[in-house]
Amino acid sequence: MENKEIARLLWETADLMEIAGEDSFRIRSYRNGATAVEGYPERIADILRDPARNVTEIPGIGKGLAAALHEIVERSSCEKRDALLQKFPPTALEFLKIQGLGPKGIALILEHYRISTIDEIERLCLEQKLRVLPRMGAKLEEKVLRSISQYRQRSGRYLLSYAETMAAELMETLRQVPGVTDITPAGSLRRGRETVGDLDLLVTGPADAVIERFLAFPRVEEVLARGENKVSAKVGREGLQVDVRALPPDTFGAAMQYFTGSKDHNVAIRTRAVKMGFKLSEYGLFRVEDESKVAGATEAGVYEALGLPWIPPELRENCGEIEAAAEGRLPELVELAHIRGDLHMHTTETDGRATLEEMAQAALARGYQYIAITDHSKALAMANGLDEARAVAFAKQVREINRNGLGIRVFSGIECDILKDGTPDLANDALAELDLVIFSVHSHMNLEAAEMTDRLLRALECPHLRVLGHPTGRLLLQRDPFPFDFDRIVAEAVRRGVWLEINASPERLDLNGTLARSARAKGARFTISTDAHHPQHLASMRYGVLTARRGWLGPADIMNTLPADRFAVALRTRP
Ligand code: DGT
Ligand code: CA
Ligand code: CA
Ligand code: ZN
């Protein structure tokens, strides 16, 4: 744990203490401690682990705080903080991020109103219920409303799937404007980032008509800014910001390049342009000496004039893609069309919403050659997970199904829970009956990194395991990845021929691009699967593919790009 993180937990604890109205002397000692930790040149975690050292040697840290520091480093929290978090709604710490209220204000509000969300604080302001409290007034209500909207802008990110759906709706509308020829999303959405801050749409066509049509879109909630060729508005109940730019066709490529970003990629590209005697802007690529325009109508033209092949948007994070492009070694990236099957899905046997036959039909309609049905195991009792007997019966049933033929090959599988100690939820002889065994962590995600690593290492020992499902356990915008020694698990998975899943569910996208890329460098193989609980979820495959592309993966890295017969052979083959 880094000093910054430790300090943050101390700050939080102090803030919570203040909301609780605790002794100001003790609160100050936490804040002093936080400042001391933050600025300390050595890693506090190392000092705590060193038996020859004592953290109280650090000015500002006394005995009481030393105990809290030990707890924080060991389990990311301390008793004090835990107790306070019990007392207040879990969002109390979030309330502190609203400028203007402060711990005292929050305490006062919590004393008078039963609220637990920022939306409820907003409502109190709108209903003028803060001004009736002591030392609060109409001015404060205004200030709080302003800071709530600022806070939302800071923290407001949206799932890629949400932004993409909204973009599709808007593009459909704007395409109907007479004179519109091209329309594309730019920004993080085009780069396939897992979450999107705001939506950037580029349109060629008559600016006035485009802007009018956009503003007439029924889901536009609030216009933020309007210029000659640009308009920004909040769209939809979730308040996603959308920036629409109308452009002349001869600058469309330069604008696409500029507004796709990422910012870091653009900075590097612009530096390259300058070195070559050019000036690059959203209007085009210009020669410095005579200001003549070299490129701008197409994005490929801009890259070409800079001596580069076109770079796929998913790679534009300034993580080596420009160097790779310059040296002619951009990777071949996997595409949706390469995917021949989906290897993680659930049915009504557990918590899915459709039968095996319905899932198979939907997969067939997508043009797949095969699927694996991977229902839950018994540890997920709420989902009616399969025990050994049901798993074995299921394997038998699938063999019969394949004899009769559904027009698509079905592999019998399971998503078997990894228990707290790393052993699988089902016995080996049952797992041995199934064609494809996924292991996933669904419980006890708050373990220490070392314990989690041991748990996963133990799970990897199972000879029937073939795929590690959603390897980091994260839920986007909700739950961070659980900590573990990723490199070590990857090395072990590679050694044992266990494939890593890129879970394509838009709430997960796990592994993410960065981790997938680093695992690939260590020799890992992957599956991209949707974890579908409904036939419609099979369509999420595209998000998984985008994520794999952000990880520089090609079709050869992804097992479910293999045709059915070769995939079946791969399933039976171990290193
Ligand atoms: P987001 O919206 O937070 O998910 O991420 P982006 O990448 O969509 O960022 P956004 O919407 O602020 O800007 C879209 C693109 O426009 C960005 O990726 C690069 C370009 N851009 C915006 N501001 C700047 C800037 O100040 N400098 C440069 N070089 N590029 C910028
Ligand atoms: Ca954006
Ligand atoms: Ca933007
Ligand atoms: Zn699943």
Image (cartoon, rainbow, N blue to C red):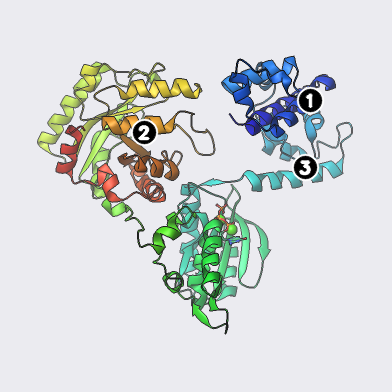
Q: What type is the residue that disc 3 sits on? A: Val
Location of residue 314 by image quarter:
bottom left
Of labels 3 and 2, earlier in sequence is 3
Q: Circle 3: is it few (<14), some (14-19), or many (20+) Cα within 10 Å?
A: many
Q: Give the percent coordinates (x, y) of residue 47.
A: 63, 22
Numbered disc in front, either 3 or 2:
2
Residues 465 and 272: in front is 272
Question: How many numbered circles are shown?
Answer: 3
Q: Give the percent coordinates (x, y) of residue 132.
A: 86, 34
Q: Which residue is mark 2?
A: 490
Q: Circle 1: is it few (<14), some (14-19), or many (20+) Cα within 10 Å?
A: many
Q: What type is the residue that disc 1 sits on? A: Glu
- Left or right: 264, with 144 as reference point: left
Vertical comparison of 568 with 239: above or below: above
- The kind of secondary structure element at disc 2 is helix
Of labels 3 and 1, earlier in sequence is 1
Residues 490 and 378: in front is 490
Q: Which residue is mark 1?
A: 18
Label 1 CB-ligand 1 distance < 8 A: no
Residue 359 visible in the shown view: yes
- The kind of secondary structure element at disc 1 is helix
Q: What residue appears at the point 33 percent right and 29 percent down from the top-left corner?
A: 492
